[in-house]
Image (tube, rainbow, N blue to C red):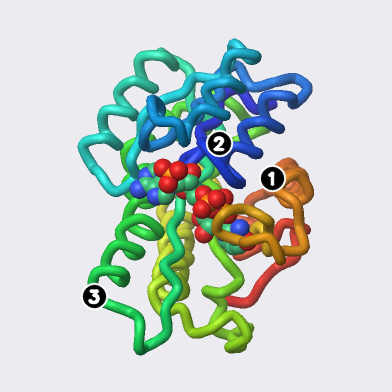
């Protein structure tokens, strides 16, 4: 049973759908921390409205680029959780600037690296005590960190149909290495870490041509999550649970 879950970038797209479907789970999590960088902005209105219908949704401010914001959010979560732990962290927030060699800039490379790779790692670091408590308290459902990655980061599956998109591909490949390192370091604590490709999904990032709806993708991800075990830690799965090559 998922007692407590945190989703980053949950004001729109896949993050909002994750919160929507998790809130409806049976039984629902006690605490669903729905994090976004500007909870008071019009861009978070759908999330704020959703939270009005579910008393277990806590909308919290979290900008994964801002290490002060990450710590403030972690401190708030510690207060709410008390002695309880965090069972599931979904590092979903991400940016995609696109761009081939002609278009890529040092700024888009660094910004992507910060949001897509450094952010998830620092969020995990700040929430480690809460994840460790969950893993200690719960034998059946340990603690899990899901890094939402992309098939575009796979070197073996590289084809240029989606363009070279340096900043995105490189930052998500770095995130995959973060997954590997976390899985190795956290296994002693009973915490699993897995990279998940959500499929090509109709969101602002995925665009209208994408074949999957948010609901299809998120239902798949949640099913994959429910079957994760030690052997999946440090692996790269898609929303159907199929293993992807790095
Ligand atoms: P969207 O562009 O629709 O949403 C991105 C989310 O990330 C928004 O909530 C955005 O918040 C948030 N975000 C961006 N930067 C930050 C930050 N610094 N701090 C906190 N939140 C931030 O994208 P999707 O929902 O499609 O993507 C979700 C994840 O899935 C991403 O990691 C993406 O790379 C991955 N993915 C998506 C695919 C697709 O086809 N859609 C395919 C493969 C992977 P704000 O509103 O404030 O900008």
Q: Are marks 2 and 1 in contact (CB under 8 Å)?
A: yes
In the depicted view, which residue is nearer to us: 15 or 82?
Answer: 15
Which label is found at residue 225?
1
Q: Which residue is mark 3?
A: 106
- Above/below status of 202 relative to 169: above
For marks 2 and 1 on the same chain, the one whose residue lies earlier in the sequence: 2
Which label is found at residue 88?
2
Q: Secondary structure at mark 2?
A: strand
Label 3 to label 1: alpha-carbon separation: 36 Å
Q: Secondary structure at mark 3?
A: helix
Which residue shows up at 24% across the image and 75% down it?
A: 106
- Under 8 Å from ligand 1: the CB of mark 2? no
- Residue 204 pos. (x, y %): 57, 54
- Residue 238 pos. (x, y %): 69, 62
Query: Would you call the spot at circle 1 few (<14 residues within 10 Å), some (14-19), or many (20 or more)?
Result: some
Quarter of the figure with the C terminus: bottom right
State left or right for residue 198 relative to residue 234.
right
Query: Would you call the spot at circle 3 few (<14 residues within 10 Å), some (14-19), or many (20 or more)?
Result: few
Query: Would you call the spot at circle 2 few (<14 residues within 10 Å), some (14-19), or many (20 or more)?
Result: many
Q: Secondary structure at mark 1?
A: helix
């Amino acid at each position: 049973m998922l007692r407590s879950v945190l989703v980053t970038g949950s004001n729109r797209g896949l993050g909002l759908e994750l919160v929507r479907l998790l809130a409806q789970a049976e039984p629902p999590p006690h605490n669903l921390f729905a994090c976004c960088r500007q909870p008071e902005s019009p861009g978070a209105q759908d999330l704020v409205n959703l939270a009005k219908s579910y008393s277990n949704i806590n909308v919290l401010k979290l900008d994964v680029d801002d290490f002060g914001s990450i710590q403030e959010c972690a401190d708030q979560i510690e207060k709410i959780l008390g002695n309880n732990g965090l069972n599931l962290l979904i590092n979903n927030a991400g940016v995609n600037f696109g761009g081939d060699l002609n278009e890529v800039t040092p700024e888009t490379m660094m910004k992507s690296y910060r949001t897509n790779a450094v952010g998830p790692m620092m969020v995990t670091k700040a929430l480690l005590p809460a994840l460790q408590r969950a893993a200690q308290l719960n034998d059946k459902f340990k603690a899990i960190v899901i890094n939402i990655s992309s098939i575009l980061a796979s070197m073996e599956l590289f084809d240029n149909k989606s363009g070279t998109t340096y900043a995105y591909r490189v930052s998500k490949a770095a995130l995959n290495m973060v997954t590997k390192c976390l899985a190795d370091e956290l296994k002693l604590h009973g915490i699993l870490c897995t990279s998940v490709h959500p499929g090509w999904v109709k969101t602002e990032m995925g665009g209208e041509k994408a074949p999957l709806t948010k609901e299809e993708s998120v239902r798949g991800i949640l099913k994959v999550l429910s079957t994760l075990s030690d052997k999946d830690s440090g692996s790269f799965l898609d929303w159907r649970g199929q293993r992807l090559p790095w």
